[in-house]
Amino acid sequence: MSDAHENGEDVTTPLLEIRGLSVSYRTRAGAVPAVRGVDLDVWPGQVTAVVGESGSGKSTTAHAVTRLLAANGTIDAGTVRFGRHDLATLSEAELRTVRGARIGLVPQDPTVSLNPVKRIGEQVAEVLRIHGLATRRSAAAEAVEVLNRAGLPDAAVRSRQYPHELSGGMRQRVLIAVAIAAGPELIIADEPTSALDVTVQRVILDHLQHLAEESGTAILLVTHDLGVAADRARRLVVMSQGRVVEAGETRTVLADPRHEYTRRLLAAAPSLTTARPRTPVPATPSTLASPAKPAKPASPAAPAKPAAPADATPLVEARNLVKEFRLPRAGGESRTLRAVDDVSLTLHRGRTLALVGESGSGKSTTARLVLRLTDATSGQVRFDGADVTTAKGARARALRRRAQLVYQNPYASLDPRFSIGDVITEPLRAFRVGDRASRLARARELLDRVALSATTLERRPAELSGGQRQRVAIARALALSPDLVVCDEPVSALDVSVQAQVLDLLAELQADTGVAYLFISHDLAVVRQIAHQVAVMRAGRVVETGPPEDLFTEPRHEYTRELLAAIPGGRAPSFTAETTAS
């Protein structure tokens, strides 16, 4: 039970009151304001969502509550009132009695938030011991109980494992266990599900919502996904450029947005809308020698899906692909995991084939087989009519030139030591295309094509935003004018407006060049916007295929129906054209 109940306080007042909060970061160029005069309330037993793009100040606002800002971050003005305390002025010793005990934090990335050399149970038990809630002897058993409450299956077994032995969804539930271990009154969840599959995401969010409803816990949910906010939050706070531009009851804000920025977010959010019409644009040959005029999609976030000739020879044919991995021996017997099981796919030029499914479904392994980045156990891969299943040497190198890859995490896939110019021209250097001057000219053309300034050439990946880095990754993939680009979760970590821009860009490039995309995603709302054909994968097998218009309106397989039911935004109010376009 919270202190508010125990002390007889009025639970109709906000548990957390932020007034006039301003935060800045010290840089070599001087102080950079990140949050400007923010007012925000969080109520007991309710989920309050803060939404906005990267750089809007939403995470800085959340971290300022517990004073866990970066070393160069400073609270310049305002109050952060939590119960009887102003957290903005508490000493570090006083803050330690609040953090963990009364306020829990669920960070975004469990990979970097959990200690890789400590077992799961030890990390939860540590919280209990620090706050005097368990003895060294009892902490282990009580940690298992907390993991159970956080929804971790086989908690007693998992508690003895290390973080790398758990899936992403399991690690996120461990972070929830750490946050709820001391029974806090407030939980701050900072993008807790942005990188998770929709079904795992639903389980995590269900649990957080259960805490709010059953225990009276207040939850401050930071997210860039308006679908998640629409489904889960009672109150919605929209931030842009460090300021709150709109706030109120979620249904009211979403059904009748007052601020232009809110309307733009709604228009860009695929999870909040049904499939929107696209203008077909015929694919035409091009080598990207010069910038093209932007395509004109039917709506701000609706990429055009170009048509390809129905009788064209398939660019990619995968026939009965199987990929098995050896597992450690158990009981003296050898074991194998069949990650891809009898998969057959066809992809034509100028078309987009989407592979969807949960983590571990085999979609990324299938893509690696198509690209010949790993060898198939059995089956055949044909590229432009030629069998490349066992291609090596010059034949494999020729395939590399015609098929490129865009990874999920653009920061991890770009060499931080390289300038952007070096990143984009690297494929040209590797294949000895042109001289230094022509490669640099090509890099400028590609940057223009992906709507980045030529001045970006001299910058480093760390100096760009996530959306800008992904544009650079796309430019690099297009440097050699490939026939096929594999997009492996290319927008899953991006804000909805940046996500919409990248999807528009991919569709425009396809319309102009006839490039084919193998698009890997766990987000069916995104797939619905960009794909011509969808293959749903589960446990290594394709369970259903079809055009998105058919598959999403009349799914035949139960697993497809389960994925569709898990798309966030299903509980949101419907939006009229006037609402999103006005």
Image: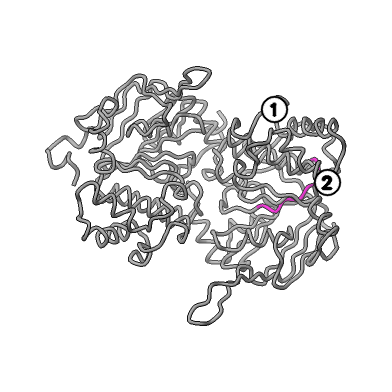
Mark 2 residue element? loop
Which residue occupies 59% across, 39% down?
499
Specify the farthest residue to the bottom: 332
Compared to residue 564, the image places residue 78 above or below, namely above
Tell me if mark 1 has few (under 14), some (14-19) or many (20+) residues whose alpha carbon lies within 10 angstroms of its own: few
Residue 431 is labelled as 2
- Alpha carbon distance from label 2 to label 1: 22 Å
The region drawn magenta spans: 512-519
Label of residue 26 in the image: none
Total count of labels: 2
Give the residue drawn at x 37%, y 19%.
Answer: 76
Q: Is residue 34 above or below residue 500?
A: above
Q: Position of residue 121 (x, y in %)?
A: 33, 58
Q: Which residue is mark 1?
A: 458
Q: Please report contact status of discs 2 and 1: CB closer than 8 Å, yes or no.
A: no
Q: Residue at left 42%, top 21%?
A: 36
The kind of residue on which mark 2 rests is Phe
